Image (tube, rainbow, N blue to C red):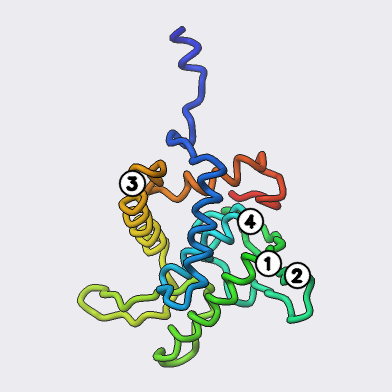
Amino acid sequence: MADEQASSPPSRYPRPPVTHDEAEWVWRLLSTEAMSITAKPETVRLAVIVALTRATGARYSDLLRCTVDAVDLGEVAARAGEGRVLVLHGKHRTPREHVLDPGTVLVLSRWMDVREELCTELEGSVPRALLLTVHHTHDNGVTVASGLPITRQGLVLSWRRFVHRTNARYGGVRPPLPTRFEQVRRAWHDASDDAGPAVRGGAD
């Protein structure tokens, strides 16, 4: 028994993913909220993160490398609003192009409008990063304007704020969402068996 335990490699992700249905519920909730005229910029950005993760299997590190130039939302006459995004996956930054469904295109289009508003007060050139900060922040006592490229920690905190709000709102009605977004990403990534249409190339 001891030999069997010693020969079994430890699980890379000890925390289980949510179910695929739960992950889809998160996507429906955020995509609906993002399209509301009263949606906060942070909600729209989080909907984009979920949409791109669902479509590409990308992790935070992959999404942070995405630029506006990597996104093609198609033209007005495009097929059913279909779009595409080029993601640099993993440590080796392997480029893979992914198809975006109409719902994802709608959310990204909304974010592009919000993103433009966030950059209006910036001096100098506008960042090319797709994901930007939506609040003024402080760095060593210095106020940093919104509209700048967000960090991984910023994405982590944004997801946790959403989780705390959602768990409080749906407590006793739905299973609580995990504070680690990876457990939601894996619901789509694992369901595709690392190579199916939900991931279209996988992640690092």
102 horizontally vs 177: left or right: right
- Sequence-wise first label, 1 or 2: 2
Secondary structure under badge 1? helix
Tag 3: amino acid: Gly
For mark 2, does the 10 Å Cα neighbourhood hold few (<14), some (14 to 19), or many (20 or more) residues?
few
Task: Give the distance between the C-alpha atoms of the residues marked 2 and 4, in whole angstroms.
Answer: 19 Å
Tag 4: amino acid: Thr
Residue named by callout 2: 80
Q: Is residue 12 above or below residue 85?
A: above
Q: Quadrant of residue 92?
A: bottom right
Q: Nearer the viewer, mark 1 or mark 3?
A: 3
Q: Which one is in front, 192 or 63?
A: 192
Task: Tell which residue pokes out farthest to the left in this image.
Answer: 141
Residue named by callout 3: 171
Residue 131 percent across, percent down from the top left? 49, 71
Q: Which one is in front, 87 or 93?
A: 87
Q: Nearer the viewer, mark 3 or mark 4?
A: 3
Mark number, residue 56: 4
Residue 46 percent across, percent down from the top left? 46, 64
Tag 2: amino acid: Ala
> How many numbered marks, from 0 up?
4
Q: Is residue 97 visible?
A: no
Tag 1: amino acid: Pro
For mark 1, does the 10 Å Cα neighbourhood hold few (<14), some (14 to 19), or many (20 or more) residues?
some
Mark number, residue 102: 1
Residue 124 percent across, percent down from the top left? 45, 92
- Residue positioned 57% across, 56% down in the render: 53
